[in-house]
Amino acid sequence: MKPALKLILITLPIIALGAVVLAYVIATGAPPERIALAERATPVRVITAETQAVAPHVIGFGLAQPARTYEAIAQVGGTVDYVNPALKKGGILPAGSVLLRISPADFKLAIAQADANIRAAEARLSEIAVSETNQIAALEIEDEALRLRAADLERTETLFQNGTISQTALDNARTAHLAQRQKVQSLESALALFPTQRVVQAEQIAVYQATLETAKLNLDRTEMTLPFAARVASVSVEAGQFLLSGQTAALLDGIEAAEIEAQVPIAALRRLLRSTMDDTPAIALDPATMTDVLRRLGLSAKVHLRLESEAITWPATVDRISDTIDQRSGTLGVIVRVDTAYSGVEPGERPPLTKGMFVEVSLRGNPEDGIRVPRSALRDGRLLLADADDRLRAVQVSTALVQDGIALISDGISPGARVLVSQPGNVVDGMLLAVTEDAALMDWLAAAGDAE
C-alpha cells in the first residue's frame, strides 16, 4: 500500500479518534485539586535565659622563681676550714645552718694586736697624766724661785741707785731674773700642751678600739650562716680553698615562698580591673598605680601545674605588677606569690613548686550577676529570641562581661526568655520557628564561668 493511502486510511482516523477521546475526558472530568498555601516553621535550637553569676578572670603563664634568694659572698678572705656536707646542689638546709667556715687564725692575731695597741695607748695616757703632775710640781718650785729672783733684782736695783754696787752686778741680777722667767714660761707652755696630748691619745685609743671591733667583726664573718631555709642552687667552694673577699661561695633559693611573673594580655587585665572596680572611668597602666589597685581589690589567684591529664593547684596572692611590658607579645607581668610552695609535698604525687616550672596563673575578680548566653549567640549586640507564639524576635542587649565562650547579659532580656543558639538561614523578624531546647548547652552554661 502506498504511503499516501496509509496516511489517509490509518493514521488520520487514529489521530481523530484520540482527539475525540481527549475532548470527552476534559469535558466530563473533575477539575484539579487545589493545595492551600501554609507557613513553614524553621527548626532552631534555644536555651532558657537564667540569671547566674560569672567571675571575671584572666589567664597568664610564667616560670616559678623563689621569692627569696641568698648569695653566700665572702666578706673576708682566707682559707676555708669547713664546708657543710649538705652544701651540695639540690640539698635543702634549715635556717641557721653553717655553710662554711674560714680559718680564724689571722683574725685572732689582729684582735690580739689591736688589744696590745689599746693597752699601749692607755699606758701613754697614764704617762701623760704623771708627766702633767710632775710638771705642775716643777712649776710651783720655779715660780717660787722666780719670786726670789724678782726680790733679789729689786734689792740690787736699790743698792745700785745708792751707788753701793756696780752696773755689772745689776746686770747679773737682771740676767738671773730673766733666766728664771724663761724656765717658768717653758713649764707653763709644756703644761698647756697636756690637754691636747690627752685628746690626741684618747682619739688614738678610739682608733685602736675601732680596729679591735673590726677585727672581731671579721672574725665573726669567717663563719657563713644561712638566714632562712633554702635549697642549694650552686656551690663553688670546697675545703682547703682560698676564698677571696667578695667571692661567691654558693647560691641558695628560699623554700618558704615562690613567685611567678605571669604574662597577661594588657587588654584582658584592664578588662578584669574595670569589671572589679565600681564607677571607674579609666585605669592608668603604669605599674605603680596598677600594683596599688591590685592589692586593694583583693583579687584571688591560683597557680596550676599541668601534668598530662592532671593539674596540681596552689593558692596564691597577687603581689605586684612588673615594671616592663613585653614588646614582642604585648603582655604585662603580674607577679603572684605562693606561700605554700613546699607544703604538702607527696613524692610521686605532688611535687614542690620549684624554680623553672612553667605554670598557669588564673586571676579572678568578684562574681557578677547576669544572664549567661553562648558568645556565638550574640551578633552585633543583638540576640534572637523565640516569643510565646514561636515567632522570631531580635532584641538589642547590653553585656556586662564577655570572656571565653560566654557572654553575660546585663540588660535587654529577662529570665525565662528563649534565646536562639542556632542561626537560621534567613533571619526575618516574626518568622515561625520550630523550637528545640538544647539541654546539653544549658548544662555547659551552668558550669562555665563558675569560680574555682
Image (cartoon, rainbow, N blue to C red):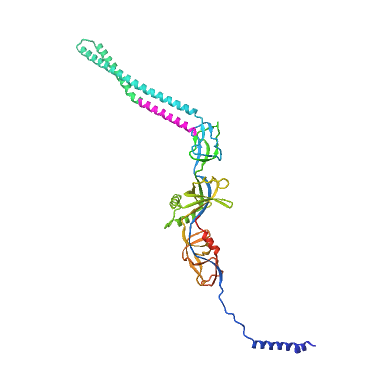
Q: Nearer the viewer, residue 299 or 136?
A: 299
**Percent from the top left, x then y, of residue 262?**
51, 50
**Percent from the top left, x then y, of residue 348?**
58, 46
Q: Predominant secondary structure in magenta?
A: helix
| The furthest residue to the right | 1
Task: Pick the quarter of the image with the N terminus.
Answer: bottom right
Q: Nearer the viewer, residue 43 or 270?
A: 43
**Percent from the top left, x then y, of residue 369?**
46, 60
| The furthest residue to the left | 162
Does 181 sit above or below residue 17? above
| 249 part of magenta stretch | no
Does 86 sit above or below residue 178? below
Does 251 sit above or below residue 420? above
| 210 part of magenta stretch | yes
Q: Nearer the viewer, residue 442 or 237?
A: 442
Which contiguous range is marked in magenta? 198-223
Q: How many marks?
A: 0
**Percent from the top left, x then y, of residue 138?**
31, 18
